[in-house]
Amino acid sequence: MTSLPTMTAAAAAGAAAPRAVLELENVTKSYGSEPPVQALGGVSLTVAAGELLAIVGPSGSGKTTLLHIIGTLDRPTSGTVRVDGVDVADLDDRGLAALRARSIGFVFQQFFLAEHSTVLENVADGLLYAGAGVAERRERAAAALDAVGLGDRKGFRPGKLSGGQRQRVAIARALVGRPAILLADEPTGNLDSASGAAIMELLDGLSAAGATIVVITHDRELAAGMPRHVEVLDGRIVHDSALPEAA
Ligand code: ADP
Ligand code: MG
């Protein structure tokens, strides 16, 4: 059991294998026809609950395509995608949207905050589809803001915050529904290096507290600083630090 090639860093360290929250098996994605462009050429990846990993690769390597497939915004051409134990092939588009709302929190390079709402309202909006009442939404939003260190900014408008603080709000909004996976696309891309480092430190702490976080980036230095890094090139994984090196 311990020698399965899909074992995680935690399993390798001897801990009981945690639940897999993301499983890609031989996923391909092609765009268009005559001739089709193959953006992913057979990607297999397992992410366990509580992991923090970076998917890193140069422009054109397939990162955005992979993000769309992991985030269930797009379906693979072939192969299997399971999110939180659910095979996306078993779901119609409505089911997929529901899975996405329930299981995935998104963070983007641009923060996408509602400028006319308060910080608290922005985060509470992350629970709009969770069926929680307004009082519970506000209570959970307040707790999420405390968790990202913005407990004293709840009544502010986003425009009064620094870039790093705005990204913290976006992270709180993504996490407030306790998704199985937080998916962050170049989360430090719009930040100076000090604010970017602080955001990475925050993600590290959130992961230690139990969140599962996948960061997509072209920044090799940032990726190298993370507990697990997965390198993509030409639509394939060419290195996964959680796996033994191929001979
Ligand atoms: P990255 O995000 O790493 O820059 P992408 O996933 O955007 O890589 O692209 C991977 C490959 O797929 C590239 O060759 C790109 O040109 C191609 N591609 C991406 N999206 C489309 C699309 N909608 N139609 C056709 N080709 C695409
Ligand atoms: Mg891209």
Image: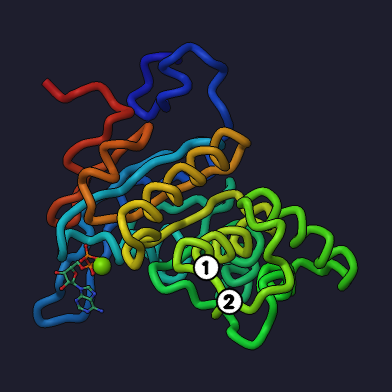
Image-based side of 42 in relation to 188, left or right: left
Q: Nearer the viewer, residue 95 or 161?
A: 161
Place of residue 212 in the rendered image (x, y in percent of width and height, measured from the top left): 53, 43
Residue 198 placement, left or right of 205: left
Q: Residue 135, percent across and down?
A: 90, 68
Figure check: 183 above or below 96: above
Residue 89 visible within the image? no
Q: Secondary structure at mark 2?
A: helix
Provide residue 236's location: percent of width, then percent of height. 19, 49
Quadrant hosting residue 224: top left
Real-space CA distance between mark 1 and mark 2, rounded to the nearest whole angstrom: 6 Å
Q: Residue at x 84, y 60 (%)?
A: 139
Q: Which residue is mark 2?
A: 158
Q: Is mark 1 within 8 Å of ligand 2?
A: no
Q: Residue at coordinates 21% horizontally, 80% vertically from top-left?
A: 32
- CA neighbours of label 1 inside 10 A, class few (<14), some (14 to 19), many (20+): many
Residue type at mark 2?
Answer: Pro
Q: Is residue 152 above or below residue 208?
A: below
Tag 1 near tag 2, CB within 8 Å = yes
- Disc 1, SS: helix
Residue at 51% x, 45% y: name it.
202
Up the image or down, 144 lies above or below 60; here it is above
Q: In which quarter of the view is residue 161 placed?
A: bottom right
Local crowd at mark 2 within 10 Å, few (<14), some, or many (≥20)? many
Label for residue 166? 1
